[in-house]
């Protein structure tokens, strides 16, 4: 199904229980999206998300997917693309980790890096090749402003998102002119179950706001989307703050 108007008719979500992904799928089903594949670890939450989208009129398939099992990505995702053209892939999986614990437990820190970066590289390349074979489609990658500059409070998570962001940008350049569009989405602090219990942050946003920004970005064929948009200016300034000063900032 070729998408000529920005909104996809078919959608593959990697990270099927992501609240941002669910908000995005919900928003897209209100327009043209009719068939959705939710890829994630089998769980009641995955089935609940699928049923909610079915209730909105979409045809929804669930696909067993483990970001950490890179050896299975080719086969698992290949089966999806063998069934139908996919107009959009939303790479939405990731874990926040626990900075204080992970500093004392290198294996836990590695799990954050492998999930957020290594798993995304593997799945991203598999999907990019399939989209290129189709000759059309969008790959939307959920990055984070945390990857813009390492902060003391979450540098393990931030470094994994920095790697993902650089990978997605490079992949977008590599696919330029092939008919495949790569869009990097950089939300700030998003109020979700993953961030529940954490102190709220300035310019905090919601899954619904990120979903709206994704839909707008698709329509505009944007390469980078900030949520909220004012974060672009904020992070541009923070990138140039000298490190001795940056260390003293409450970020």
Image: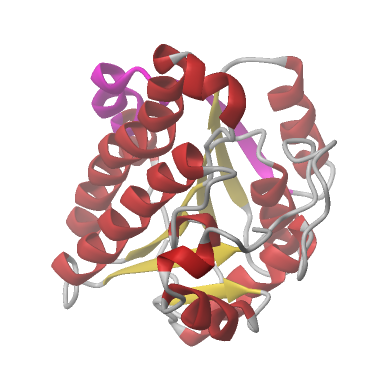
Q: How many marks?
A: 0
- Residue closest to the eye, 159 or 7: 159
Q: Where is residue 116 in the image (x, y as percent from the top left)?
A: 43, 37
Q: Is residue 243 in view from this perspective?
A: yes
Image height check: is 67 above or below 134? above
Q: Does the magenta run of residues contain 134? A: no
Image height check: is 115 above or below 135? above
**What is the image's colouring?**
secondary structure
Q: Does residue 245 appear left or right of residue 115 in this picture?
A: right
Q: Quadrant of residue 166?
A: bottom left
- Residue closest to the eye, 19 or 106: 106
In the rendered image, the residue lying farthest to the front is 244
- In magenta, the rendered stretch is 58-78
- Identify the residue at horizontal 67%, vertical 53% (top origin): 25
Quarter of the figure that contains the N terminus: bottom left
- Identify the residue at horizontal 47%, vertical 13% (top origin): 105
Q: Position of residue 60 (x, y in %)?
A: 64, 37
Q: In which quarter of the image is residue 33?
A: bottom right
- Residue closest to the eye, 102 or 70: 102
Q: Position of residue 191 (x, y in %)?
A: 80, 51
């Amino acid at each position: 199904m070729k998408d000529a108007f920005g909104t996809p008719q078919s959608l593959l979500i990697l990270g099927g229980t992501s609240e941002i992904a669910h908000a995005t799928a919900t928003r897209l089903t209100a327009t043209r999206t009719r068939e959705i594949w939710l890829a994630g670890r089998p769980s009641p939450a995955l089935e609940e998300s699928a049923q909610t989208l079915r209730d909105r009129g979409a045809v929804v398939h669930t696909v067993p997917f483990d970001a950490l099992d890179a050896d299975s990505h080719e086969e698992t995702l290949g089966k999806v693309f063998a069934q139908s053209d996919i107009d959009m892939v939303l790479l939405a999986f990731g874990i926040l980790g626990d900075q204080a614990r992970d500093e004392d437990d290198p294996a836990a820190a590695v799990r954050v890096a492998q999930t957020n970066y290594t798993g995304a590289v593997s799945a991203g390349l598999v999907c990019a090749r399939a989209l290129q074979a189709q000759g059309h489609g969008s790959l939307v990658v959920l990055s984070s402003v945390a990857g813009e500059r390492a902060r003391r409070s979450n540098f393990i998570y931030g470094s994994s998102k920095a790697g993902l962001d650089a990978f997605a940008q490079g992949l977008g350049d590599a696919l330029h002119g092939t008919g495949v569009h790569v869009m990097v989405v950089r939300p700030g602090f998003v109020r979700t179950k993953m961030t529940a219990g954490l102190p709220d942050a300035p310019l905090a946003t919601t899954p619904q706001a990120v979903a709206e920004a994704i839909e707008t970005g698709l329509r505009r064929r944007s390469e980078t989307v900030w949520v909220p948009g004012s974060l672009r200016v904020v992070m541009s300034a923070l990138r140039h703050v000298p490190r001795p000063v940056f260390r003293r900032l409450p970020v």
